[in-house]
Amino acid sequence: TCSVTLAMIKPDAVMKMGSIIEAIFDTGFIITKAKMVQLNRMEAMDFYSEHQSKSFFTDLINFMTSGPIIALEVIGDDAVSSWRKLLGPTNSCVARSESPGSIRARFGTDGTRNAAHGSDSIASAARELEFFFPSSGGRGPKNTA
Ligand code: CMP
């Protein structure tokens, strides 16, 4: 069934956004919102708060605040799991052996610098979409969808 997820192009892959967006459309997804932003440390720590106790947390925050990212609202059949399938394994080195055509295999570097992110559940997708695309009021043109 048709559903929605949050896809994010990370700082290491922003220069490859054209190829990544092409792969998204080639797989049959629709992009309904897009935003390029540079996260500050508080925002990155908030976004990744579920990982705050992990050994890699500081590396992750340093990486995610090192340059702009692109947040995308992506719609497709079973979007959360199908986007994560297109991403491939979290570690880009593992992705290159286990899922060579995946986005992390093609555009990422290692376990931290892995090109892109996808929400891991429907509940995470709702939280992460609200983080980048708050639904409350505001002036100006409204996003489609
Ligand atoms: P992402 O899917 O955005 O979710 C959490 C991120 O933390 C992950 O991609 C990686 O960028 C990073 N990460 C996850 N596991 C590790 C790990 N074992 N070592 C280093 N970084 C990791």
Image (spheres, rainbow, N blue to C red):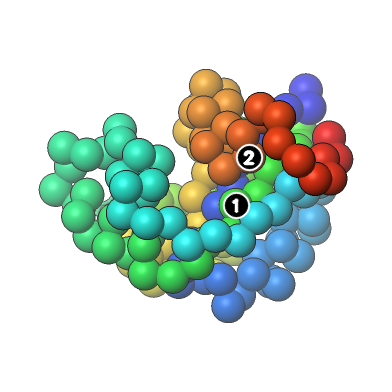
The image's mark for residue 52 is none
Which residue is painted at 26% across and 38% down in the image? 51
User: Residue extending furthest bottom?
Assistant: 15
User: Residue extending furthest front?
Assistant: 139
Look at mark 2 in the image and give the residue it sits on.
133
Quadrant in which the C terminus appears: top right
Examine the rendering and report whether any part of residue 64 can be seen. yes
Q: Position of residue 9 (x, y in %)?
A: 55, 60
Amino acid on which the number 1 mark rests in the picture: Ala
Left/right of residue 85 with respect to residue 43 in the rendered view: right
Q: Is residue 135 above or below residue 23?
A: above
Amino acid on which the number 2 mark rests in the picture: Phe
Left/right of residue 52 with respect to residue 104 in the rendered view: left
Q: Position of residue 33 (x, y in %)?
A: 74, 47
The residue lying toward the viewer, choosing from 67 and 29, is 67
Quadrant in which the N terminus appears: top right
Cα–Cα gap, marks 2 and 1: 9 Å
Left/right of residue 11 with respect to residue 5 in the rendered view: left
Which residue is painted at 30% across and 33% down in the image? 50
Mark 1 is surrounded, within 10 Å at the Cα level, by few (under 14), some (14 to 19) or many (20 or more) other residues, namely: many
Q: Secondary structure at mark 1?
A: strand
Task: Note whether ligand 1 is within 8 Å of mark 2.
Answer: no
**Upstream in the sequence, badge 2 or badge 1?**
1
Look at mark 1 in the image and give the residue it sits on.
71
Which residue is painted at 59% across and 47% down in the image? 7
The residue lying toward the viewer, choosing from 130 and 9, is 130
Left/right of residue 115 with respect to residue 40 in the rendered view: right
Which residue is painted at 56% across and 71% down in the image? 14
Q: Position of residue 124 (x, y in %)?
A: 49, 28
Label 2 with label 1: CB-CB less than 8 Å: yes
Q: Secondary structure at mark 2?
A: loop
The residue lying toward the viewer, choosing from 110 and 94, is 110
